[in-house]
């Protein structure tokens, strides 16, 4: 991918994350952090849903022609997210707390965004 294509992908991802943050807030989530990095992993959004700490992966697409966005969260990506979440809990010195992994699927279509939250995905 050339530099322009990479920049376009990052921009699309950022727009998708902004849409997801707004959607999560409207659905009662408290956003704690965005783009948390630990070692080689990144968690798009760290939030609380009630008393549960939620690690959110955001997947955006312009259409579902090649499948739903959430289908791209592979087992390898899930493992990286788990390790990154463990790093978050250790780094922030969080004690015992219920945690889960959600995926927010964003499909951007003609200026509109359709979102759905898949809770406790893995």
Image: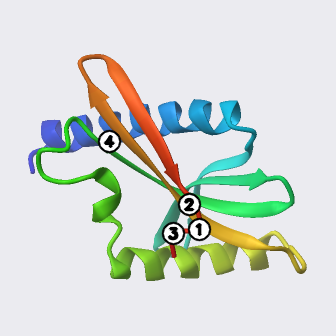
Measured in 3D between alpha carbons, the distance from the residue under mark 2 to the one under mark 1, in whole angstroms, is: 5 Å
> Going from the N terminus, do you reach mark 4 or mark 1 first?
4
Residue beneath the point at 56% across and 79% down: 82
Is residue 66 rendered to the left or right of residue 43?
Answer: left
Q: Are marks 2 and 4 in contact (CB under 8 Å)?
A: no
Q: Which mark is residue 102?
A: 2
> What secondary structure is found at the residue carrying circle 3?
loop
Q: Nearer the viewer, mark 4 or mark 1?
A: 1
Residue beneath the point at 19% across and 37% down: 63
Crowding around mark 4 (Cα neighbors within 10 Å: few <14, some 14 to 19, many 20+) is few
> What secondary structure is found at the residue carrying circle 4?
helix
> Going from the N terminus, do you reach mark 2 or mark 4 first?
4
Residue beneath the point at 9% across and 51% down: 1
Q: Which mark is residue 10?
A: 4
> Going from the N terminus, do you reach mark 3 or mark 4 first?
4
Q: Which mark is residue 120?
A: 1
Measured in 3D between alpha carbons, the distance from the residue under mark 4 to the one under mark 1, in whole angstroms, is: 26 Å
Q: Are marks 3 and 1 in contact (CB under 8 Å)?
A: yes
Crowding around mark 3 (Cα neighbors within 10 Å: few <14, some 14 to 19, many 20+) is few
Identify residue for label 3: 121
Q: Give how far across and how far down residue 57 sits, in percent.
A: 49, 57
Q: Are marks 2 and 3 in contact (CB under 8 Å)?
A: yes
Is residue 68 rendered to the left or right of residue 95?
Answer: left
> Based on the displayed image, in which of its 4 quarters is residue 94 positioned?
bottom right
Crowding around mark 2 (Cα neighbors within 10 Å: few <14, some 14 to 19, many 20+) is some
Measured in 3D between alpha carbons, the distance from the residue under mark 3 to the one under mark 1, in whole angstroms, is: 4 Å
> What secondary structure is found at the residue carrying circle 1?
loop
Q: Give how far across and how far down residue 53 sits, in percent.
A: 76, 63
């Amino acid at each position: 991918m050339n530099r322009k294509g990479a920049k376009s992908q990052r921009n699309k991802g950022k727009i998708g994350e902004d849409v997801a943050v707004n959607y999560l807030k409207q659905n009662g989530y408290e956003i704690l952090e965005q783009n948390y990095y630990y070692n080689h992993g990144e968690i798009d959004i760290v939030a609380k849903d009630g008393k549960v700490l939620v690690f959110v992966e955001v997947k955006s697409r312009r259409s579902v022609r090649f499948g739903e966005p959430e289908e791209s969260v592979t087992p390898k990506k899930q493992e990286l997210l788990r390790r990154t979440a463990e790093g978050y809990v250790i780094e922030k010195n969080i004690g015992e707390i219920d945690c889960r992994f959600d995926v927010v699927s964003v499909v951007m279509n003609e200026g509109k965004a359709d979102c759905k939250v898949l809770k406790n995905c893995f």
